[in-house]
């Protein structure tokens, strides 16, 4: 089994508070992100990831987010196998207590 890097919602919130330059990608469906996303996150639904690979840079570290951390974990496994630098936010938006944008 491949090891996937993880970050907790609290750790991510701390990095955002510290103004670290992060590349967040929310892989939830359109109706899910309508309930709010983490500021600066880019929305690419999970099903669209394979056809949007050309938009992602293998040199850029990405943090993937979903509702619970399951789908983003699957996306991370897929992208890691393609040579991307990925981290999964464990617990997903269910654990997020920070700011959200609509």
Image (cartoon, helix red, strand yellow):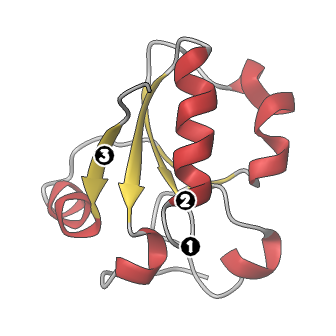
Of helix, strand and loop, which one carries label 2?
Answer: helix
Position above or below: 102 against 56: below
Position above or below: 8 against 44: below
Give 88 or 24, whichever is nearer the viewer: 88
Question: Is 28 situated left or right of 91 in this image?
Answer: right
Looking at the image, which residue is at 83% across and 48% down? 47
Give 30 or 101, whichever is nearer the viewer: 30
The residue labelled by disc 1 is: 67
**Circle 2/circle 3 CB separation < 8 Å:** no
Give the mark nearer the N terminus: 1 vs 3.
Answer: 3
Question: Is 43 situated left or right of 11 in this image?
Answer: right
The residue labelled by disc 3 is: 6
The residue labelled by disc 2 is: 70
CA gap, disc 2 to disc 3?
12 Å
At which x and y percent is residue 55? 71, 25
Q: Disc 2 vs disc 3: which is toward the camera?
A: 2
| Quarter of the image that includes the C terminus | bottom right
At which x and y percent is residue 59? 44, 13
Of helix, strand and loop, which one carries label 1?
Answer: loop
Residue 84: give its label: none
CA gap, disc 1 to disc 2?
8 Å
Position above or below: 45 against 57: below
Looking at the image, which residue is at 74% across and 24% down? 53
Give the mark nearer the N terminus: 2 vs 3.
Answer: 3
**Circle 1/circle 3 CB separation < 8 Å:** no
């Amino acid at each position: 089994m491949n090891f996937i890097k993880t970050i907790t919602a609290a750790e991510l919130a701390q990095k955002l508070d510290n103004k670290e330059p992060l590349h967040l990608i929310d892989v939830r469906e359109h109706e899910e992100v309508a309930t709010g996303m983490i500021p600066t996150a880019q929305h690419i639904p999970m099903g669209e990831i394979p056809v949007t690979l050309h938009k992602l840079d293998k040199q850029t570290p990405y943090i993937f987010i979903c509702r619970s951390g399951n789908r983003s974990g699957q996306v991370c496994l897929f992208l890691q196998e393609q040579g991307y630098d990925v981290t999964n936010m464990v617990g997903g938006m269910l654990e997020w207590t920070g700011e959200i944008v609509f």
